[in-house]
Amino acid sequence: LNQLLAEMDGFDGSKGVVLLAATNRPESLDPALTRPGRFDRRIPVELPDLAGREAILRLHAKDVKCSPEIDFNVIARASAGASGADLANMVNEAALLAVRDGRKMVVQRDLEEAIEIVIAGEQKKGTAISNKERMIVSYHEIGHALVAAKCQNSAPVHKITIIPRTKGALGYTMQVEQNEQYLVSKEDAYHRLMIYTGGRCAEELIFNSITTGASNDIEQATKLARAMITRYGMSDNFGMMALETVNNAYLGGDTSLQCSNETATKIDEEVATLIKKAHDEAYQILLDNKMKLHELAKYLYEKETITGEQFMYILNKPVEIPTSLNNTETNA
């Protein structure tokens, strides 16, 4: 630090020298470095917003032959949370997909598939999964989607698939927000908890058993429930009391508790209670829509991948009652 400060001495606005530096630990910078006359201007480089993602996609797409019918706004909405490097990789992956299919230009479905490749990995179509496991995954994913569809203000379901991916996922449900969302209400956060638990609830309801397939859901639900209580002030018991701090937002966002051991125990109990409540409500939604759960899971099992439009069409149409059941009821 002393050597750096010594090297920077003597520079001023008339020397024609601009000194730039970058760090992903801004909170640990020495005040002597950031005082006026040294590194006195900070330019935070955050993840791009919706407009930024669309502009970045268009920038990288200039070097690739693309169909004029591509809607970059749809791709930008589906890639929420992606960095500039991720978006560049998506355009590159889309170009590779087009070449593999023997086409001379990138189309919409190439970019949509590229998002999934960057997020979840390549499709593992050759992976041998038993019919029973495929059926369990079908119910699991429809459980997520069905709970999401029944929660108010939840992001619409965009795509559901049970094709395994190279990053370990046996299937996933993709939701896409209509607009960029900067604030999350307590109700919205709680609905996300319900959606996270929906897959496990479907397994319990249909198979009276549980599998390891919900491991990532459990991790995400626990992280969200803990943040609601310790950082967002969404707890009735603790209120607006800061119990946890984010150590570094640019390096994984790891957190540390700032409370006594007794309070930490109470936090754990409240997290478990909150997740259980969300689980029970999600379970009741699936129980009330059990026939639709069967119908949608069967359709997903047969098709392997369905769009949000197909999902909503089946969900909203009247329940199909088997003919034999009708005859039985008539005779009775």
Image (spheres, helix red, strand yellow):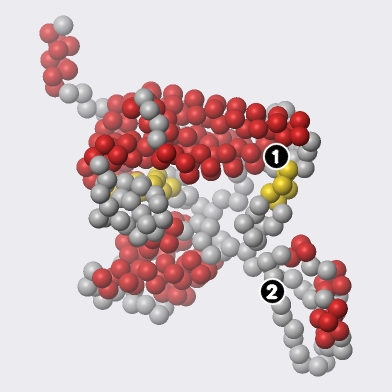
Q: Position of residue 187 (x, y in %)?
A: 58, 35
Label 2 Cα crowd, 10 Å radius (few <14 / some 14-19 / many 20+): few
Compare residues 146 and 8 and report the one nearer the observer.
8
Q: Position of residue 149 (x, y in %)?
A: 41, 37
Q: Secondary structure at mark 2?
A: loop
Q: In terms of sequence position, does the residue under pointer 2 or pointer 1 come before the other?
A: 2
Q: Reply above or below: 106 against 325.
A: below
Apparent side of residue 54 relative to residue 111 in the rendered image (left or right): right
Question: Which residue is painted at 54% across and 27% down in the image?
Answer: 276
Apparent side of residue 271 relative to residue 114 in the rendered image (left or right): right
Q: Quadrant of the C terminus?
A: top left
Q: Position of residue 203 (x, y in %)?
A: 37, 31
Quarter of the image holding residue 23?
A: bottom right
Label 1 Cα crowd, 10 Å radius (few <14 / some 14-19 / many 20+): many
Which residue bears the numbered disc 2?
Answer: 22
Q: Reply above or below: 233 against 93.
A: above
Q: Reply above or below: 80 against 243.
A: below
Q: Position of residue 214 (x, y in %)?
A: 44, 39
Q: Secondary structure at mark 1?
A: helix
Compare residues 332 and 121 and report the one nearer the observer.
121
Q: CA distance from mark 2 to mark 1?
A: 31 Å
Type of amino acid at the residue the image marks with label 1: Thr
Residues at marks 2 and 1 touching, judged by CB atoms closer than 8 Å? no
Type of amino acid at the residue the image marks with label 2: Ala
Compare residues 110 and 245 and report the one nearer the observer.
245
Numbered label attached to residue 230: 1
Question: Which residue is painted at 53% across and 43% down in the image?
Answer: 220
Apparent side of residue 313 relative to residue 2 in the rendered image (left or right): left
Which residue is most to the bottom?
Answer: 15
Question: Which residue is painted at 87% across and 72% down in the image?
Answer: 32
Question: Which residue is painted at 43% across and 47% down in the image?
Answer: 175
Q: Is residue 99 visible?
A: yes
